Image (cartoon, grey):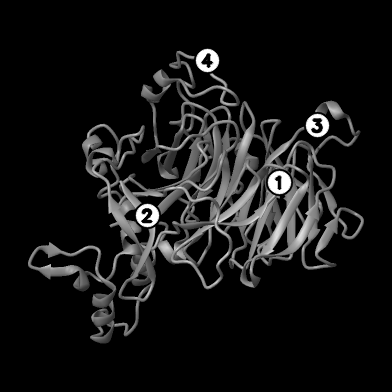
């Protein structure tokens, strides 16, 4: 493996780059350690390798420079193309544009992974559950078990912009979501009431209904206040236009809340177990993805749901419950994190109308909240796996650990990254499946992490109460670093 030490040098763009030490395990160990990702060429016959697939071609188009810059001779190509060659190509107008394309920019920026650090942003006495950058990266939200949500001003030295004391909290902050205009924040807990607060009003401290109004949005369809019908909300997201919320709950349902009318507009009895995660597929808001403890991912089309009352399709492949989903934003591809210790990549055009063989082939009993994943379970494969690719190496235990595509602006969504129960953040190449970085910034479970939408910066939140960031190459501010741990890397091509 590559290992980063503290020495630095400058590359041709003037960035400070960490020197790399080559470990003798590089060739043999890159796909070991339980990492049987579908990108391993040795596993090509066993898994669905993405080489030549449409998804790989789309990723390539986003992250490779002009074909003329890649050629070094007849039938020969050079990758990665150096920055110097890109600059020369721009001056010679090889592309005909007279400037860098977005693919040129992603080709350069995606090579600078946020691995320097870690630097401590904050430390609380309770577990951190949520990490989230705003759409423009100017704000960062962190939610804690101890009734606290803190919003940091990223561009002002990470000062606390809003210190929110949650209202009627049950167990923990399970999820938060910022409105697209960054005016409002909603937060959920193990309750049918989602609260919304104006983060631009008042002072820095926001005590529920004392210094700020935390309006309660009731997702319950039961009007008589019967506590027996109470449920918790695991996941809540704003729509792109900011007019709706979608939520997944412990009563196996999906809810859509109309913020303008201040009432539920849709309830779907979606799964046969907890709906741990939901999200909109794209900007239109018509398609909704959901993942559940029934091991299934489902796609819902709101345009035809009332007529059919059924999902548009079902995607099978996970052996255990789904902890999180992230859409690529194109209404076609998404990823899911599963308690079977895998991330899977899906194409909704491959979905089916029915679920087959749901769990009947499992020969073990297991509870992810307190047990290690059985060794024999790692060898099992779903006989009707519809996923495009599978990524392994991280650990999904104890809590609903989250995964994401890397930002489109800086990386062309070339990577997938995830928290892990082993106190690390893992970054995988989405096409090859190889693990390109492992950030060991915490003392215990990393439940959530978020990559800045424009800069090579990744912030993670952990059950050790620490909010920590890693960067490349680092900025002029020199905060006190956390105790140093080795960061293990594979080469990024």
Q: Secondary structure at mark 4?
A: loop
Identity of the residue drawn at 50% across and 67% down: 454
Instruction: Compute the Cα span from label 4 to label 1.
Output: 31 Å
Q: Going from the N terminus, do you reach mark 4 or mark 1 first? A: 1
Identity of the residue drawn at 77% across and 58% down: 163
Q: Going from the N terminus, do you reach mark 2 or mark 1 first? A: 2
Q: Going from the N terminus, do you reach mark 3 or mark 4 first? A: 3
Q: Is residue 304 visible?
A: no
Which dot, 2 or 3, sits closer to the camera? 2
Residue sitting nearer the eye, 405 or 118: 118
Instruction: Compute the Cα span from label 2 to label 4.
Output: 40 Å
Instruction: Compute the Cα span from label 2 to label 3.
Output: 50 Å
Q: Going from the N terminus, do you reach mark 2 or mark 4 first? A: 2
Q: Position of residue 375 (x, y in %)?
A: 41, 21
Which label number is shown at residue 365? 4
Q: Secondary structure at mark 1?
A: strand
Which label number is shown at residue 144? 1
Which dot, 3 or 4, sits closer to the camera? 4
Residue sitting nearer the eye, 110 or 472: 472
* Disc 2 + disc 1, Cβ < 8 Å: no
Reading the image, the residue beneath label 3 is: 230
Residue 83, quarter of the rendered image: bottom left
Reading the image, the residue beneath label 2 is: 4
Residue 253, quarter of the rendered image: top right
Q: Residue furthest left?
A: 74
- Above or below, 304 against 183 in this view is above
- Left or right, 135 with reference to 405: right
* Disc 4 + disc 1, Cβ < 8 Å: no
């Amino acid at each position: 493996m590559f290992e980063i030490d503290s020495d630095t040098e400058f590359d041709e763009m003037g960035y400070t780059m960490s020197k790399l030490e080559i470990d003798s395990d590089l060739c043999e160990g890159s796909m070991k350690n339980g990492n049987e990702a579908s990108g391993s060429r040795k596993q090509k016959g066993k898994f669905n390798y993405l080489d030549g697939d449409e998804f790989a071609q789309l990723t390539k188009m986003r992250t490779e420079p002009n074909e003329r810059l890649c050629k070094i001779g007849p039938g020969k190509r050079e990758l990665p193309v150096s920055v110097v060659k890109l600059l020369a190509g721009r001056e010679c107008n090889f592309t005909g544009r007279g400037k860098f394309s977005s693919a040129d920019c992603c080709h350069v920026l995606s090579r600078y992974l946020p691995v320097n650090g870690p630097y401590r942003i904050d430390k609380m006495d309770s577990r951190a559950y949520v990490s989230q950058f705003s759409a423009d990266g100017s704000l960062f939200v962190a939610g804690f078990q101890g009734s606290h949500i803190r919003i940091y001003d990223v561009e002002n030295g990470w000062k606390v912009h809003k210190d929110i004391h949650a209202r009627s909290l049950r167990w923990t902050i399970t999820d938060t979501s910022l409105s697209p205009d960054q005016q409002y924040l909603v937060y959920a807990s193990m309750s049918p009431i989602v609260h919304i607060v104006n983060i631009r009003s008042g002072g820095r401290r926001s005590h529920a209904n004392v210094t700020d109004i935390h309006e309660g949005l009731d997702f319950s369809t039961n009007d008589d206040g019967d506590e027996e019908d109470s449920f918790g909300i695991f996941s809540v997201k704003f729509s792109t236009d900011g007019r709706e919320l979608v939520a997944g709950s412990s009563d196996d349902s999906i809810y859509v809340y109309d913020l303008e009318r201040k009432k539920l507009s849709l309830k779907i009895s979606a799964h046969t177990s907890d709906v741990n995660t939901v999200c909109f597929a794209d900007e239109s808001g018509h398609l909704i993805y959901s993942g559940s403890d029934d091991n299934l991912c489902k796609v819902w089309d709101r345009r035809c749901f009332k007529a059919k009352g059924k999902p548009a399709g079902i995607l099978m492949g996970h052996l255990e419950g789904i902890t999180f989903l992230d859409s690529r934003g194109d209404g076609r591809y998404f990823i899911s994190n599963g308690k079977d210790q895998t991330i899977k990549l899906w194409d909704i055009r491959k979905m089916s109308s029915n679920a087959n063989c749901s769990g009947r082939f499992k020969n073990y009993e297991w509870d992810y909240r307190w047990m290690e994943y059985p060794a024999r379970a790692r060898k099992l494969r779903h006989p009707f796996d519809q996923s495009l690719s599978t990524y392994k190496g991280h650990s999904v235990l104890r809590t609903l650990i989250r995964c994401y595509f890397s930002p489109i602006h800086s990386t062309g969504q070339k990577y997938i990254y995830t928290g892990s129960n082993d106190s690390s953040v893992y970054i995988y190449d989405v096409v090859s499946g190889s693990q390109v970085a492992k950030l060991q910034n915490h003392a215990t479970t990393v439940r959530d992490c978020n990559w800045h939408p424009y800069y090579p910066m990744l912030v993670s939140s952990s059950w050790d109460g620490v909010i920590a960031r890693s960067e490349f190459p680092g900025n002029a501010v020199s905060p006190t670093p956390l105790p140093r741990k080795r960061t293990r890397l594979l080469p990024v091509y």
